[in-house]
Image (cartoon, rainbow, N blue to C red):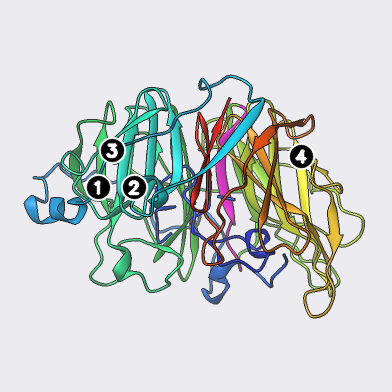
Amino acid sequence: MRTTGSRSDRSAGRAPWAVAALLVTFAACSSSSGVVSSPTLVAVSMSSAVGTQTSSTPVTPSPRTSTGPAAVETFAAQQPFDTPGAEPGQPWTSIAWTALPKDSPLLGVRAVVKWRGGYVATGETGIWTSDDGRTWTPLNAALPVVSALVAETTTGLVALAYDPGSCSYPEAVCSPAVEGLALTAWTSPDGLTWTDRGPALGLTGSQIASVAGSSAGVIVVTVASQSALEFSADGISWQSVSVPAVSPQFWCSDAAFGRGRYLLLCPAQTPTDLGDTPTQPEWSASGLEWSVGSAPSTPGRPASMDTLLVGRNGLMATGWIPGAGGDEQWWRSTDGARWQMDSSYGPLGGEVLQGQDQGERAIGFLRADGDRFVALAYSHDGSSLTGAAWTSWNGQDWVRLAERGEPDWPADTYNAVVFPTGMLVGGSWGAAS
């Protein structure tokens, strides 16, 4: 999951929200999911290939005492909330949109992490846990941190906690290489009790570009003067991992876990004659040994994929095609190794932009929660959502939902998060059934 806004997310002219790959901050310094120029972190230069690092020996810090009452006060206003709707894991047939109160804690959620023990929601105002996907309990006492990226590990969960106010780049998550900033690892076997493991030693770079976890461990892509891929089984002890056939000049734009494997979208090692850097998909069963996937199909110039989305029976990616038009594009895959372009943008269709933006874009946007994909339709002028929604398990076969009402989608927000029971969009909750 990426921790910075994607180009395709910004295609509607909305401000990006930073994502959590199934991690937090989407709450993060920042999540997720018209056409603009390029990913946010381009200003950061790199001097070596992904996976290059001075040491591959895991570093294990010692546990230490909780940060105490001062940190707990940060979440004094954090409250529990409920998300009524469909039975988790069951098909949706309809969705009913309801405006949320302005003080609803649900409005601050930016990501939901599904793991073997239930769910964790993270956001701008805190972290919540749920064992059923409906009732959410705040962790302000058990996990007294300001912001964190949360991922599943072999032993449960890890929360990589940080202070977003210390980030050098506003839309990125920071790591210990930033002077004065401590990225702290907290671990939990059940999502309820947490242990402060101290600084997340072994992670390099000044930003975390993306992160993905499973019951086999967690991977993190870090960015600074060089890019690196790090792996940890438990979120405490980290080691560098080599990724083949990637560019030494840029970084992997997104990471995810789906279809039983870890996935990366990386820049290819060799640019084209036109100077384009195609996307090189990579996959791994273990997170340690990586294989090179096939280049995504396009009608002409190569693909620039920036965001991965995971469904129960398939994978999707969004991005664009380089060039003057800079068309937004979607791709589908069953395994993350071979990708097929979806020129119809799922059930949404596309439209050609006029004027300065030009190019083509989807008439709506795409989100996923690791189980189902959800596509939401824009109004004709792109200024609002119509309330029309579709779901799919595989990204190819879509079901139109019967809808009631329209989501409240303020001009200053682009928040859209799929929950097990429904969907948060802007200022509204969509209860599925």
Check if mark 2's residue and mark 3's residue have beta carbons within 8 Å: yes
Left or right placement of residue 152 versus residue 304 in this view: left
Instruction: Look at mark 2 in the image and give the residue it sits on.
Output: 105
Residue 1 appears in view: no
Residue 230 within the magenta-colored segment of the rendering: no
* Comes first in the chain, label 4 or label 2: 2
Secondary structure under tag 3 reads loop
Nearer-the-camera pick, 375 or 267: 375
Residue 84 appears in view: yes
* Comes first in the chain, label 2 or label 3: 3
Check if mark 4's residue and mark 3's residue have beta carbons within 8 Å: no
Mark seen at residue 78: 1
Secondary structure under tag 1 reads loop
Q: Amino acid at mark 1?
A: Gln
Work out whether 169 lies above or below 202: below
- For discs 1 and 4, the disc positioned in front in the rendered view: 1
Instruction: Look at mark 4 in the image and give the residue it sits on.
Output: 332
Q: Residues within 10 Å of mark 2 (few under 14, many from 20)?
A: many
Q: Give the Cα separation between the discs numbered 4 and 3.
A: 37 Å
Q: Give the Cα separation between the discs numbered 1 and 4.
A: 38 Å
Work out whether 384 lies above or below 22: below
Secondary structure under tag 4 reads strand
Check if mark 2's residue and mark 1's residue have beta carbons within 8 Å: yes
Residue at the location (79% across, 29% down)? 397
* Comes first in the chain, label 4 or label 3: 3
Instruction: Look at mark 3 in the image and give the residue it sits on.
Output: 80
Q: Quadrant of the C terminus?
A: top right
Q: Residues within 10 Å of mark 1 (few under 14, many from 20)?
A: some
The region drawn magenta spans 249-259
Q: Give the Cα separation between the discs numbered 1 and 3.
A: 7 Å
